[in-house]
Image (spheres, rainbow, N blue to C red):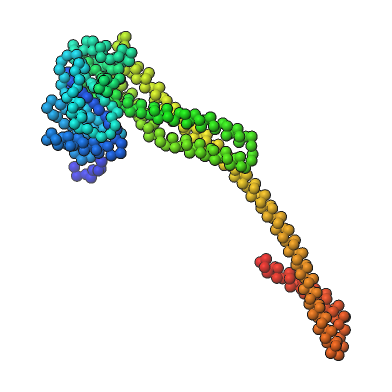
């Protein structure tokens, strides 16, 4: 087309077809592994797969590719890179017979050769079997006390698992095909693998919530005590100490909230994906058995609710701490203003006293200056009288005294006004 295309158009279109369902037919053995992408592990996992492909003379994943498919002699590999984890899904045709009767040594050997970095979080051993080969497999393989057994694809298949790790560390899932097409089988298997993957990742928030619970409880216990002290005391030092305690509690709470923000958000998102995948498999209950939806709802929902409740407690407690700190800060500010007012009043009184002392000194200085000036005038008149001039020193001094006093007072007042300006 002659139109200018958006630079992300191709990427957006390709995203809808990035992970298509691979057609499957029973009997098939599948091993599914998920490794956490921490730090540079995502790129390192792709590099490990590229080295594995190169050792077999096969083409590895393209630079920056989020998924890759590889076909070996009777074995297929699907590699997918997600934001938080990378998955390796191995498939091979299984021999007819009782499911899980033999260990998946060949697929495990391939997985060990890849040796991807990162921590293993999901390991699934899934068998897609014919109905004739699995008559008593569910009861014989899985623990009866935790068996989840349901009909899927509206009766076209049955799925079973106890969600427990076997001696190899693999969670076993049995899919019994009754009338599945290859496309239906591929879609069902992929959704079951995603349910187990997202279920496991969703539960990563539970240890975080359990670790934060004692801290939140302690802060919830200390806060009422601080508020009671606020009501009973109105001293500046007491309020300041209470504000310091509230600030320390708020900092501790916000540190935990910031550290768990991503984990709790991811837990909610993964839980929603589990619910969507459960709706997509078309599950129907089987009489006498606990279904997948019931099992996961009973075991998974309380853990998710714990994470959600913990985050809600963090948010509510953060708001309460903020309001209490704001109230205390207001009281401290009022106390500071009161102290400043008292200090200003003391300074004002001192200024008034200083002004009165200054006025007293000015009055004394006027008298002193007048005295010295009048003495000088008296000496001048006395000298003139001694020289024979017709001047009476005492009369002249008496006349000069009020004039000198008024002149000195006027001069001092003028100087004071000039300094004040």
The quadrant the C terminus occupies is bottom right
Which residue ends up furthest to the top in the rendered image?
A: 288
| Tally of marks | 0
**Residue 294 to residue 382: above or below:** above
Residue 157 x, y percent position in the rendering: 23, 16
Residue depicted at x 79% and y 71%: 367
Residue 182 seen in the figure: no
Query: On the rendered structure, is 153 left or right of 96?
Result: right
User: Image quadrant of residue 97?
Assistant: top left
Which residue ends up furthest to the front in the rendered image?
A: 167
Residue 106 seen in the figure: yes
Query: On the rendered structure, is 304 left or right of 173?
Result: right
**Residue 258 to residue 184: above or below:** below
User: Image quadrant of residue 226?
Assistant: top right
Residue depicted at x 23% and y 21%: 126
Query: On the rendered structure, is 296 left or right of 247?
Result: left
**Residue 49 to residue 165: above or below:** below
Residue depicted at x 78% and y 72%: 368
Residue 323 x, y percent position in the rendering: 54, 37
User: Image quadrant of residue 274?
Assistant: top left
Residue depicted at x 25% and y 12%: 140
Q: Foreground residue, 325 or 1? A: 325
Which residue ends up furthest to the bottom in the rendered image?
A: 388
Residue 386 x, y percent position in the rendering: 85, 88
Query: On the rendered structure, is 74 left or right of 170?
Result: left
Residue 318 x, y percent position in the rendering: 49, 35
């Amino acid at each position: 087309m002659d139109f200018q295309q958006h630079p992300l158009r191709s990427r957006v279109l390709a995203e809808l077809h990035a992970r298509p369902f691979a057609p499957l037919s029973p009997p098939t053995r599948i091993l599914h592994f998920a490794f956490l992408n921490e730090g540079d592990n995502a790129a390192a996992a792709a590099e490990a797969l590229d080295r594995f492909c190169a050792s077999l003379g096969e083409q590895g994943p393209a630079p920056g590719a989020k998924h890759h498919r590889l076909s070996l002699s009777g074995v297929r590999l699907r590699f997918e890179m997600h934001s938080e984890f990378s998955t390796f899904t191995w498939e091979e045709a299984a021999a007819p017979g009782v499911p899980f009767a033999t260990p998946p040594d060949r697929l495990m050997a391939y997985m060990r050769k890849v040796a991807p970095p990162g921590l293993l979080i999901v390991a699934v051993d899934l068998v897609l079997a014919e109905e004739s080969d699995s008559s008593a497999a569910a009861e014989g393989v899985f623990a009866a006390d935790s068996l989840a057994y349901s009909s899927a694809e509206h009766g076209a298949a049955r799925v079973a698992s106890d969600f427990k790790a076997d001696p190899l560390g693999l969670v076993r899932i049995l899919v019994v095909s009754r009338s599945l097409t290859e496309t239906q089988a591929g879609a069902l298997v992929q959704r079951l693998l995603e349910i187990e993957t997202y279920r496991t990742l969703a539960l990563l928030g539970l240890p975080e919530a359990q670790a934060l619970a004692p801290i939140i409880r302690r802060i919830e216990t200390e806060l009422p005590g601080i508020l009671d002290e606020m009501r009973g005391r109105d001293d500046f030092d007491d309020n300041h100490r209470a504000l310091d305690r509230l600030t320390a509690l708020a900092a501790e709470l916000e540190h935990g909230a910031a550290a768990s923000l991503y984990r709790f958000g991811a837990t909610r998102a993964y839980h929603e994906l589990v619910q969507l995948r459960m709706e997509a498999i078309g599950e129907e209950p089987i009489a006498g058995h606990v279904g997948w939806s019931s099992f996961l709802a009973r075991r998974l929902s309380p853990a998710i609710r714990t994470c959600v409740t913990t985050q809600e407690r963090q948010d509510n407690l953060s708001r309460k701490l903020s309001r209490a700190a704001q109230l205390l800060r207001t009281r401290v500010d009022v106390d500071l203003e009161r102290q400043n007012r008292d200090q200003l009043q003391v300074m004002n009184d001192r200024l008034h006293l200083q002004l009165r002392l200054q006025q007293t000194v000015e009055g004394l200085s006027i008298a002193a200056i007048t005295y010295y000036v009048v003495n000088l005038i008296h000496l001048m008149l006395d000298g003139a009288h001694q020289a024979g001039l017709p001047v009476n020193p005492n009369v002249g001094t008496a006349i000069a005294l009020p004039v000198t006093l008024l002149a000195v007072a006027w001069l001092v007042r003028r100087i004071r006004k000039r300094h004040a300006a």
